Image (spheres, grey):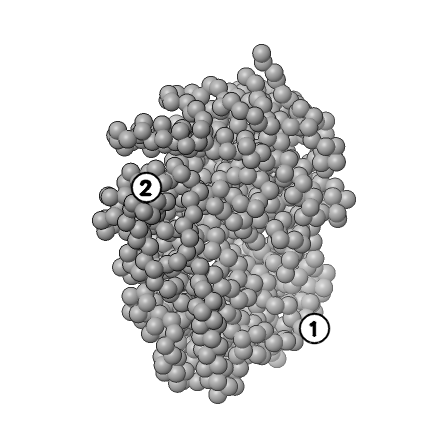
Amino acid sequence: MESQLALIEQSFNSRYSCHVREALDELPDSFTITDPSICGHPIVYASRGFLKMCGYSREEVIGQNGRIFQGPGTDRRSVMEIREAIREERTIQLNLLNYRKDGTPFWMLFHMNPIFSKEDGTAIHFLAVQMPLSGRGRRRGRLSHDSGTEDVMFGSCRKEVCFDSLLEVGRVLEHNNSVLDSEDSAGVVDIEETCEANELEKRRAASAIKNILSVLTHYSELTGRLVCGKRGCCNGTSPLGSSVAISLGRIKQSFVLTDMHLPDMPIVYASDAFLKLTGKSHTCRWFCGHLKYSSTCKLVIECSQRCEVSLGYLILLLLAHAGYSRHEVLGRNCRFLSGMDTDPSTLFHIKESIRAERPCTVRILNYRKDGSSFWNLLHISPVRSASGKVLFSCFNVPVSRT
Amino acid sequence: MSLSLKIKRVPTVVSNYQKEEVGRRSGGCGRNCFNMCCLPGAKLPLYAYHGVDSTSDEKAFAELEDADIPMAFLDSLILGEWEDRMQRGLFRYDVTACETTVIPGKYGFIAQLNESRHQRKRPTEFRVDKVLLPFDGNKFNFTKVGQEEVLFQFEASENGEVQYYQNAPIDVENSPNVVAINVSPIEYGHVLLIPRILECLPQRIDHESFLLALHMAVEAANPFFRIGYNSLGAFATINHLHFQAYYLAVPFPVEKASTKKISIIDNCGVKISELRNYPVRGLAFEGRNTLQELSNMVSDTCVCLQENNIPYNVLISDCGKRVFVFPQCYAEKQAMGEVGTELLDTQVNPAVWEISGHMVLKRKKDYEEASEENALRLLAEVSLSEERFQEVKALIFHSIFCSLNEEALDSEEDVEVQFAEDLLGMKLKQQQGSHSAMVAGTHDCLVMQ
C-alpha cells in the first residue's frame, strides 16, 4: 500500500505548507479530513481529539474510509445522507451513531464541510467535525414506561423516550434483568432513536469548522494553492462530483478523458496510473461521471449532471505512460502528445471523427515529456448522456508493448 | 363463493423469445434456448460469490471493496456483459436515449419517458386475486430465453472466496442460478436474477432464493444497485421465480423517507421500521448482524403475505443492508373498477420501481406534466389504507414471532403472543401452518377465496 500512503502524504503536502499538521494538532476539536480524489475516499488527517474519542491510533485511521466507525446500530439512512452530501459536495449536519475501537457505540453530532479549491472550484477535501453528545456515556440505558418502579438508566441524555409498540415494552420488561448486567454490546443497542444535539453543541461544531478552515486557508496561501469553504466561481466548467473521483480511482489503467464541449477539447481527467511516473498527485477537474471497469476491458460510465440522471457508455483500451504530471496535462489538448513526426492527417482524422460523433481507432506517433516518441493505438469513443447528447470523447492511450 | 379478479394489461417483454401465444416445442427447438434441449455442452461465465456469512458483514463488505480482483467485480461484470449485449443489438430499444429527470419537490421522484417499453399490443388478462399460482410450463418462462440473453451463473463459492470462471459448464443436475438481461430495460444494466432456473419455480419467495438475492446485493457492493421483486398480483408479469435489478445513480425517494422504528427483536439483529411521510405504507428492515438473520426475517414476512394472499413488492437497497416490503392493492382496485380513468390512462403499473419512486411513463404528455402531486396521487392508490396496513402488520409480526420462537425453545412464547393479542385487541391465528382466513375487520381491499 505504499503508493496509497504516498498519495495521502501528497494530498496535504501539495496543497498546504509543511507546518499545517502541527497547527492542526494544536486544535482541541475532534475532526477528520478526507480526500475524495484518492481511491476509497480515505482519511488523510485525524486530529488528536478524534483519535482520543474513538480509541484508535493515527496509523490505524489514516488511509481508512469513514465507514470503519459505523456499526450495526448506525442508521443506514443517515449513512446514505452523508454519501449524497459527498456526491453533491455540500455541507451536512446530522446525529450519528459511531463505534469506538473497543466496540462501544456513542452518539455524536457529525458536521461535514467540503473544502474547495479556489482555482477551479472542485472539492479537494472534506472536513468533518465530530461533537460527542452530552452525557452519552458507555452505559446503555433501559427503556421503561413506568419510571416509578424500574431503575431507569439513561446516562444523562435528556431526550424523550417514545414507544412505538407496547409489544416492545412487554419484551423489554420480561428481559430487563438479563439485559441490565450484560456486557455484550453486540447486536442490541437499546437506545436507538436519534439523540438530538442541543444548540450549544451545534454552535460549537460550527465554530470548530470555522477555526479549522481558517488554519487550512492560511496554510494554503503559503503554497499559492488556495482553498476556501465555499465554492468560488470557476471558469465555466460544470461542477464535478466527488463520488466520481472515488470511482475513477478504482480504475487501475492509465487513461485520460477529454471534454469535447469545451473549446479545444481539453483533458478533464487523468488517472493515477497515467501520472505514475511523476509520482505527483494533484487535484484535477472532474466531470460528473461514474466510471466502472468491466471484465471485457470496456468502461461504462454513468453521467449525472445536476438534476439530470443519465447513463452513457465508454469504450477504453489499454494505456500508456506519458510521464506528465496531472497539473501539466489539465487544460491541454491531447495534441500536446504529438510532436514533429506525428502524421497530421491522422490528427485530422481524429478531429473529424469526434466532430461526427463516431468512434475511431488510429495509430499515432506520440511524444513523452522527455521527448522520446512511442507508437500509440488510440481509440476514441463518444460518451452519451441519457438524452442522447454526446458529452465528450474518451481518448485512450494504450501501452505499446515494445 | 369464489370470485376471480382479472385485469387487462400489456405484459412487459423481458425476453426476445416471449410471445403471447401459448405453445410448447417438443424436442430440440433449435433456438439455443435455456432448456434441456439446447443446454448440454453449453458454457456460461460463472461468478462464485463470497458466500461465507461472517459475523460482521460490515467487514466483509469492506474487504470486498479493497480486494484486488479487477476482472471479477460483480457490478463491472454485469455492466460489461450488458454493454456487450447492447452492442449485439439484443435490446428492444436504447435505454440511454430515454429522457430522465428528477421531479422537483421534496420527495425527488424520478420520471423517465419510455415510449418503447410498453408495446402497442393487444392486452392480455392477468389474474390479480391470487398471489400464489402453480408454474405453468405452457406459458412463457425463462427456460425459453435465448442463451445469448443469459449473462452468467451466480453461485456460492465453495471455498468462501470470490471466483470467476469465464467458460464454466452449466450444471443441469444442480440447476444454476443465472443472471439474464431484461430486453425492455428501465435503466442501464437492468438484469433479471433467476434462482435455480431449471427447477421452474413459480413466482414466490422462499428463504433460499431471497438469501441469494441479498447476496447479490452485498456482492455488487454498490449502493446504487438495487434489487426488486414483484409478487403476482403486484405486477409481476411472469410466473417464474425472478428478481430484477438495475443501477440508478441517485437515491430512490423511498430510501430517503423517514422511518419509525417499531420493534427490536432481541437476539436477532434486525431492526424493523414503518415508513413515515411516504405515500405508500411499508416496512423497512435493516440488517444488523448476519445476512442470514435479515434474510430470514424478510422471507418470513413475504411468506406470510403470500399465504394470506396479499400482493406485495420488495426492494433491496443499500448493498443489502436495507430491505423494504410494500403490501399493495392497486391491481385489485383496478379489477373492481375503483381506479380513476385519469390514472388508468397513464397505464403506469405500480410495481416495485414505481413504488420506490422511479416512474416509467409511456406518454410524452405524462412526462411533461410529471409533478410530485401526480406521483403522490398514483402511489396513494397503491398503498394499503392505514387500518388495513396495521392489520397486515399484526399478521406479519405474529408470523415472525412464531418463526423466531420455533428456534428458541422458550416457554414464554405463548405468553408473548397472548400479550400481543391483548394489547392489539385482536385475535391472531395461534396455530402454525397455512393461514387460510384473513383477519376480519374493515378494510379496503377485500379478497375472497
Q: Residues within 10 Å of mark 2 (few under 14, many from 20)?
A: many
User: Is tag 2's residue or tag 1's residue first in the polypeptide sequence?
Assistant: 2
Label 2 chain ID: A
The correct choice, above or below, for B173 with respect to A312 in the image is: above
**Residue B30: where, in percent of width, then height?**
56, 27
Quadrant into which the N terminus of chain B falls: top right
Quadrant into which the C terminus of chain B falls: top right
Q: Residues within 10 Å of mark 1 (few under 14, many from 20)?
A: few
The residue sitting at the right extreme is B365
Marker disc for residue A263 = 1
The residue sitting at 55% across, 32% down in the picture is B387
| Amino acid type of the residue tagged 2 in the rendering | Val
**Residue A164: where, in percent of width, then height?**
44, 42
The correct choice, above or below, for A243 with respect to B372 in the image is: below
Toward the viewer: B206 or B87?
A: B206
Toward the viewer: B376 or B22?
A: B376
Q: CA distance from mark 2 to mark 1?
A: 67 Å
Nearest to viewer (mark 2 / mark 1): 2
**Residue A358: where, in percent of width, then height?**
68, 58
Marker disc for residue A172 = 2
Toward the viewer: B341 or A188?
A: A188
| Amino acid type of the residue tagged 1 in the rendering | Pro
